[in-house]
Image (spheres, grey):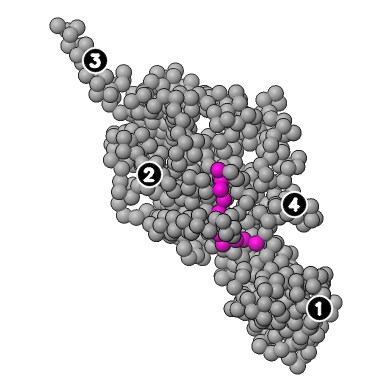
């Protein structure tokens, strides 16, 4: 009789989904890698074939997702979104590492709870080993325990079910002491077409492979630790990353395929995770947050944007959204959507180039690409990508062009596709975008003033900075640009990639004034057009001899200079497609007192394209740029 009762009890346990530990819910572990692109053997990467056995094991034992995308290409915005289950632009957590000080604290909408809080309230022991990086105030009590080691789970045996996060260095792994026989030979890597194919970039592509290989060993130790603790049979293991490779300038921090496409795979008990399956549907990593609740048998909150990836009623996505906002001191606003074959990008700040001043400026690869541009040694393709005029829209067929080289937005053959993606973007943003408008001055100062990662070079910082000589550029920015902040000398070189226009604007020229780094570049809508610089409070000097403008145009041009709406002079640009310097003599009768505005008028053929190199007052004994 006792044997019969025991057998019946065992049968009921199995039928109800209980594990051998007598619990009815699985343990769940997220192995959360930093800055890692899907360059593993299981994703068909030839270089790391057989070099990532532990990551491959997870993929081959369960489900590998081939097209998984994070909501943002930077850690804090993605991690903040993952904990909430909603894109960070919906609740105001989109700016990188915001909410770090009391005066800039961000609070979630009333009623919102983070994933660990929800898990804890439903009987789960929760812990996180390593990085958090959330862009809002959060209760540290949502993590109920802490492990001393990432790979020792013995203390969790009697704390089941548990939900744990194990943070790994991923692409940030230091590989200088990585065994030489396991390192990738830089000469054997294929540098993606959107990067210069030289020794510098070969080196850093190889380094990312090495970093993944190093992380793979740790992942193997984690899996081993679970088995030694007897927890491997009832634990769901998830491996994924927060965004793409950290040392690649068009990956991390960028709304590209490289920046947003991440590895994502799951293995676990078969009642929760299928075996040996490959998924090619579009996935948002917000789906993992929703799926985690589903594994735990918890109903997801109404604000969640994800869905249970293994639900019977699962509906494949047609769109995955992504965003880029302020990153460290670098201010931007970009929105992007991925559809079946295309990626559509909408840029909001056209007065700054793609490769703005940023936290990686002191890195070897950033210095290299900037030097190549400065020396005229960069290919036209790479000039366009990194230093060219920012386009308001981008459209790429990423199935054929994963490196996003061929922008189809201006190709009439893709007019219908462009219109479709505009509509899809508008629909995605209609659900809420708190990235519109500027951050508070306190938040800007907290991230862009006297910080080890860099100083703010964008016009947003100019709002509160002092401009003691009234030349329209703050003392701080002039110092950063290696100019004299107190010389009262008007000088515009257009070589600040974070503010190409240096405050020049136009009411009658519709094209973007900002051109390649170091230039203004625009087209006349009519036979006459003008550009103006307001907000000046500079005092004219008797030593000011001329106002020099270096430019070229593809048609003859008449150029008129005005100061405070008074005509200073008129010059002719007669040679087409030839750079010339026009020198306007400064007559003391007109150039005197306080100069509040400058205007340059262009008269010529409609459709004339003008490229301006610099504008400067030439002063007696001045060291101003004149050629």
- Residue 164 has which mark? none
Dot 2 falls on a residue whose secondary structure is: loop
Judging by the rendered image, the residue that carries numbered circle 2 is: 306
Of label 4 and label 3, which has the lower sequence position? 3
Which residue is the extreme one toward the right? Answer: 621
Image quadrant holding the C terminus, namely: bottom right
User: For the residues carrying marks 2 and 3, which lies nearer the camera in this image?
Assistant: 2
Q: Is residue 148 above or below residue 356?
A: above
Tell which circle, 1 or 2, labels the residue nearer the N-terminal end. 2
Could you tell me if residue 312 is visible in this image? yes
**Would you name the residue on which mark 1 appears?**
574
What residue do we see at 65% from left, 62% from top?
389
Instruction: Give the distance between the C-alpha atoms of the residues marked 1 and 4, in whole angstroms.
Output: 30 Å
Q: Earlier in the sequence, mark 1 or mark 4?
A: 4
Residue 88, image x and y in percent?
Answer: 43, 52
Distance from Cα at disc 4 to Cα at disc 3: 69 Å
- Residue 384 lies in quadrant: bottom right
What is the number of callouts on the image?
Answer: 4
Q: CA distance from mark 1 to mark 3?
A: 94 Å
Label 3: which secondary element: helix
238 displayed left or right of 187: left
- Crowd rating for badge 3 (residues with CA inside 10 Å; few <14, some 14–19, many 20+): some
Q: Name the disc covering residue 379, or none.
A: 4
The first of marks 1 and 3 along the sequence is: 3
Residue 111 sits above or below residue 263 on the image: below
Q: Which residues are magenta?
A: 389-399
Using the image as rendered, state which of residue 237 and residue 561 is in the foreground.
Answer: 561
Q: Earlier in the sequence, mark 2 or mark 3?
A: 3
Residue where numbered disc 3 is placed: 10
Pick the quarter of the image with the N terminus: top left
């Amino acid at each position: 009789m006792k044997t019969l009762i025991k057998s019946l009890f065992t049968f009921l346990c199995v039928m109800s989904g209980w594990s051998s530990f007598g619990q009815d819910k699985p343990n769940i572990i997220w192995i959360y890698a930093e800055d890692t692109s899907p360059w593993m053997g299981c994703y068909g990467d030839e270089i790391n074939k057989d070099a990532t056995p532990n990551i491959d094991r997870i993929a081959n034992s369960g489900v590998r997702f081939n097209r998984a995308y994070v909501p943002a290409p930077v850690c804090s915005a993605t991690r903040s979104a993952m904990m909430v289950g909603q894109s960070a632009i919906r609740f105001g957590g989109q700016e990188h590492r915001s909410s770090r000080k009391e005066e800039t604290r961000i609070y979630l909408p009333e009623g919102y709870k983070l994933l660990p809080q929800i898990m804890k309230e439903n009987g789960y022991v929760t812990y996180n080993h390593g990085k958090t990086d959330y862009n809002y105030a959060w209760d540290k009590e949502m993590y109920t325990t802490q492990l001393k080691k990432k790979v020792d789970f013995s203390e969790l045996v009697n704390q089941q079910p548990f939900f744990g996060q194990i943070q790994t260095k991923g692409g940030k792994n230091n590989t200088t002491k990585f065994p030489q026989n396991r390192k990738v030979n830089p000469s054997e890597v294929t540098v993606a077409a959107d990067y210069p194919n030289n020794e510098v970039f070969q080196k850093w592509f190889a380094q990312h492979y090495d970093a993944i290989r190093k992380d793979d060993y740790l992942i193997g130790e984690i899996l081993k630790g679970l088995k030694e603790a007897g927890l491997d049979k009832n634990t769901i293991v998830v491996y994924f990353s927060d965004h793409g490779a950290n040392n690649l300038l068009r990956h991390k921090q960028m709304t590209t395929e490289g920046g947003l496409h991440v590895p994502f795979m799951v293995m676990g008990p078969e009642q929760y995770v299928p075996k040996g399956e490959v998924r090619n549907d579009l996935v948002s990593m917000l789906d993992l947050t929703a799926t985690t609740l589903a594994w735990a048998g918890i109903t997801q909150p109404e604000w969640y944007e994800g869905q249970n990836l293994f639900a019977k009623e699962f509906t494949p996505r047609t769109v995955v959204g992504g965003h880029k906002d302020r990153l460290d001191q670098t201010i931007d606003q970009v929105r992007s959507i991925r559809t079946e074959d295309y990626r559509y990008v909408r840029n909001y700040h056209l007065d700054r180039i793609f490769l703005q001043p940023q936290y990686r400026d002191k890195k070897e690869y950033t210095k290299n690409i900037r030097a190549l541009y400065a020396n005229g040694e960069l290919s036209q393709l790479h000039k366009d990508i990194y230093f060219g005029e920012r386009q308001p829209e981008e459209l790429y067929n990423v199935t054929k062009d994963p490196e996003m080289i061929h922008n189809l937005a201006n190709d009439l053959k893709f007019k219908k596709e462009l219109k479709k993606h505009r509509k899809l973007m508008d629909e995605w943003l209609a659900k809420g975008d708190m990235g519109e408008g500027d951050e508070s001055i306190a938040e800007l100062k907290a991230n862009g003033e006297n910080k080890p990662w860099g100083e703010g070079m964008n016009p947003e910082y100019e709002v509160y900075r002092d401009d003691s000589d009234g030349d329209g550029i703050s003392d701080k920015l002039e110092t950063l640009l290696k100019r004299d902040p107190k010389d009262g000398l008007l000088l515009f070189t257009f070589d600040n990639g974070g503010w190409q226009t240096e405050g020049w604007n136009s009411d009658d020229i519709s094209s973007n004034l900002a051109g390649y780094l170091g230039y203004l570049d625009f087209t006349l809508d009519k036979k006459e057009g003008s550009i103006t610089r307001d907000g000046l409070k500079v005092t004219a000097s008797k030593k000011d001899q001329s106002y020099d403008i270096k430019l070229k145009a593809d048609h003859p041009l008449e150029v008129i200079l005005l100061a405070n709406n008074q005509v200073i002079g008129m010059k002719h640009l007669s040679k087409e497609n030839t750079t010339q310097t026009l020198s306007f003599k400064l007559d003391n009768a007109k150039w005197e007192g306080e100069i509040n505005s400058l205007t340059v008028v262009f008269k010529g053929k409609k459709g004339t394209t003008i490229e301006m190199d610099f504008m400067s007052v030439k002063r007696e004994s001045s060291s101003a740029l004149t050629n």
